[in-house]
Image (cartoon, grey):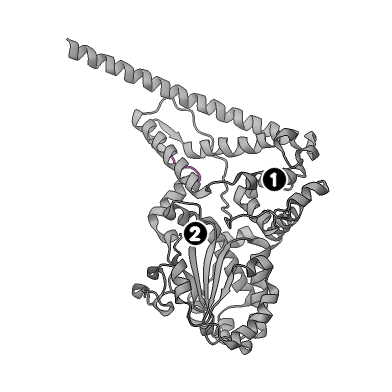
Amino acid sequence: MGSKELQHQKKRTSTFITPLEDHWCLPPQAEKRSSMSFKSVQGIIARIRRSSTLRNIIQGVRDPKEEHMVHSLRELLLSTNQLPEKHDDYHTLLRFLRMRDFNVLRAKDMFLNMIKWREDSGIDNIAKDFKFDEYEEVKRCYSHGYHGVDRYGRPLYLERIGLIDLNKLFKATTVDRFVKYHISEQEKTLNLRYPACSLAAKRHIASTTTILDVKGVGINSFSKPARELFVEIQKIDSNYYPETLNKLYIINAGSGFRALWKVLSAFLDARTLSKIQVLGSNYHSALSESVDPSNLPNFLGGSCTCSEYGGCLLKDIGPWTNPEFSGLLQEVFGQGQRFTDDKTNITMESFFRQIGSNSERALDMTLDDTEDPYGFNHNIRRNHVKEPISQKILQLEGWLAASNEILGALIKKQQELAGYINQLKKLTSG
């Protein structure tokens, strides 16, 4: 990349819209069927329309300037075969660009460090298999958790740091296990909480509002194990889950905490610090601007008590725990909802999703320099993309054949319906 292009990237600004990591698996090959019922066709069309609408809500509206930058970063990664398909996601790339002030080369380095960390640390296995068996015991000595949403619809995360019993905490768990628990929660937020909140709010949600109650916290509260835990979690969040914080309210900050804050803030980057507001005991008006009282626990001046759960923060509460939203997310982001009757068994949503996502991925690699305002495609050699394109062509040809079969069945059903209508007309005219 030339120096002029790099200079143009330094002062770009944007709103804080962060990731949605949605990954698809290839659909199982559909069995050949001769026809499908008319009711089945109607169901397919209705579900495709609904799924398309839901995906549009979750993905949100893209800013054209940001989209150009994402395209440039994506092409740079593809040119060196460094973009795993699982992480070939618009909002993921955008998060790293924002964290690096839209400097494409720096964003690329940060993204690749994240990929290496995930591989070295087995993050996919942690997200899938890690069981935090000491969860309830940890909750009793460390009051924290997700509790509803803010006024915009973002997940609301709360911690009562002043009530932490560090001795009990580190008897119940270890720093290493708590870090893995934190990672599993971050993965859950990206893959479940944000999509569910997007559906509930009917707009793209991809960041969290956090409230930390630090009443009673001072220099003496920051023991060596606590420092190690804070530094490790902060490093993970900043380096590997960037731009997922909307706003952090630190409340009940006394003189002891403010002295401690001077030390803690040294570990935070400038972008994160700009999202943090440190407040004393007069915090209620600031919180009420961002959070409806019904979503605030009564100990923070809200009206919620969660009496059915024994108190707020003892239960993970939000749109992501709503079975209706869970069903919709499975429909949109699952392996593909099956629509079956006695004559058909076709994973239609997965089929159409893969046509869209894979064809876009393949075709984007062949764009010429006229569609690349930042000049990255000039560095792409054809020998890097020839084989992947050939594979995508074969996949697309298979899907084309499957779509022709489906269209043939639709046409046949249309002809049957037309014949039925003609029979009805003859009966009525006679």
**Residue 361 at least partly seen:** yes
The amino acid beneath tag 2 is Arg
As for residue 92 lying within the magenta part, the answer is no
Name which quarter of the figure residue 249 lies in. Answer: bottom right
Q: Which residues are magenta?
A: 334-338
**Residue 334 at least partly seen:** no
Residue 20 versus residue 205: which sits nearer the camera? 205
As for residue 337 lying within the magenta part, the answer is yes
353 in relation to 179, above or below: above
Residue at 56%, 27% in the rendered image: 400
Where is residue 389? Give x, y as percent.
69, 33
State how far apart marks 1 and 2 are (Cα): 26 Å
Residue at 78%, 34% in the rendered image: 382
Residue that carries the numbered disc 2 in the rendered image: 193
Location of the C terminus (image quadrant): top left
Provide the secondary structure element on which disc 1 rests. Answer: helix
Magenta stretch, main secondary structure, is loop
Residue lying furthest bottom: 220
